[in-house]
Image (cartoon, rainbow, N blue to C red):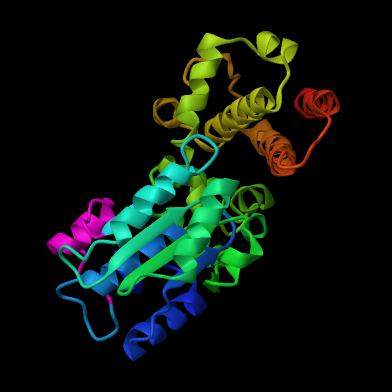
């Protein structure tokens, strides 16, 4: 992978290439956009372009040298990768970051920081991080990635150069999906071009990538440790979020089941295999209609999850969730 192989996002790529050619990278970027549109992928390729030993004149990395391989796996010694622990990024992590930035580069010329889901910085972490942005260390580059830039303090946003990523076109989306293993070729042939499939992706092919659902694996443990009934009896915000995540996983698995005709292949793509036997296979004539219904439920649950950042009445919210699932 290199800049030349990133599908879509022509404007962000032109901006980044232009900055690299002029040698005028800012000390901090803010990559924003919907999930699954290539923000993290582009950030990694930018870091490779800076450190690749065999890059070309257009700053395309070779993707094969030691630096490229280490950056690709987030193991490069001059790279500090941050992602949330649970639902937040804590101040202790920012202190570790500041210690990292205080040292001179070990192998490259730049100390690099990549913060995924930067909106999860808690208040103390955000305040500590602001001091870092106000007096950035020399020869450092910080990239913040978020789907929710409005949740970041204005003082942080204003100190970063914002690069906006947009959903891909239909053709670009299908081109990306060709390289993903979570949707079978038969499913693409059957459903690409239908409103249901396009609604599922909506220009965000990364949503279908297997690794996107990896964060749900921990949530699934709750399905074995606690029942939905026990979760409902002691309804707290964190527990309601668990219910929402579990329901999203179940609906995602239903979608995978519907778009794959091959049962063996379907089973390998299911996240929650314990619930899979309960899924009833529909005849071909009913699968598209059922897919449209499930996608609409999935969309509504995603919207509720977004609203959970506010102080919603938990009982009313739970009752609304039940009406969605039972519809």
In the picture, measured across the screen, residue 52 lies left or right of residue 296, that is: left
Q: Which of the image's four quarters has the C terminus?
A: top right
Is residue 74 covered in magenta?
A: yes
Using the image, determine if residue 76 lies above or below residue 315: below
Image coords of residue 251 (percent x, y)? 62, 31
Image coords of residue 190 (percent x, y)? 55, 46
In the picture, measured across the screen, residue 307 lies left or right of residue 201, that is: right
Nearer to the camera, 190 or 154: 154
Q: Which residues are magenta?
A: 60-78
Is residue 207 covered in magenta?
A: no
Q: Can see residue 121? A: no
Image coords of residue 231 (percent x, y)? 67, 14
Name the image quarter holding residue 236: top right
Using the image, determine if residue 10 lies above or below residue 106: below
Image coords of residue 120 (percent x, y)? 56, 47
Residue at image x 69%, y 33%? 290
Residue at image x 79%, y 25%? 318
In the picture, measured across the screen, residue 59 lies left or right of residue 200, that is: left
Residue at image x 83%, y 23%? 315
Residue at image x 18%, y 62%? 67
């Amino acid at each position: 992978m290199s800049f030349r192989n990133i599908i879509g996002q022509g404007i962000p790529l032109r901006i980044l290439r232009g900055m690299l050619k002029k040698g005028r990278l800012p000390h901090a970027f803010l990559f924003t956009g919907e999930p699954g549109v290539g923000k993290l992928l582009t950030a990694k390729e930018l870091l490779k372009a800076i450190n690749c030993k065999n890059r070309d004149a257009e700053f395309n990395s070779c993707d094969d040298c030691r630096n490229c391989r280490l950056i690709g796996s987030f193991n490069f010694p001059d790279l500090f990768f941050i992602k949330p622990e649970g639902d937040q990024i804590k101040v202790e992590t920012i202190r570790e970051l500041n210690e990292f930035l205080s040292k001179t580069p070990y192998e490259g010329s730049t100390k690099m920081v990549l913060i995924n889901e930067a909106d999860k910085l808690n208040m103390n972490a955000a305040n500590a991080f602001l001091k870092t942005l106000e007096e950035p260390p020399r020869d450092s580059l910080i990239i913040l990635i978020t789907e929710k830039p409005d949740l970041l303090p204005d003082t942080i946003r204003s100190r970063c150069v914002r690069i906006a990523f947009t959903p891909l076109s239909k053709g670009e989306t299908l081109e990306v999906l060709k390289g993903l293993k979570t949707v079978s070729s038969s499913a693409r042939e059957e459903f690409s071009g239908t409103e249901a499939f396009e609604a599922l992706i909506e220009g965000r092919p990364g949503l279908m990538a297997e690794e996107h659902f990896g964060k749900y694996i921990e949530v699934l443990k709750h399905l074995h440790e606690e029942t939905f009934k026990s979760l409902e009896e002691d309804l707290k915000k964190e527990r309601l979020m668990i219910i929402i995540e579990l329901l999203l996983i179940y609906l995602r698995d239903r979608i995978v089941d519907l778009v794959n005709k091959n049962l063996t292949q379907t089973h390998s793509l299911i996240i929650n295999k314990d619930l899979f036997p309960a899924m009833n296979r529909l005849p071909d004539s009913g699968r598209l209609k059922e897919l449209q219904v499930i996608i609409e439920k999935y969309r509504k649950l995603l919207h509720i999850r977004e609203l959970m950042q506010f102080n919603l009445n938990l009982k009313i919210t739970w009752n609304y969730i039940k009406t969605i699932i039972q519809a």
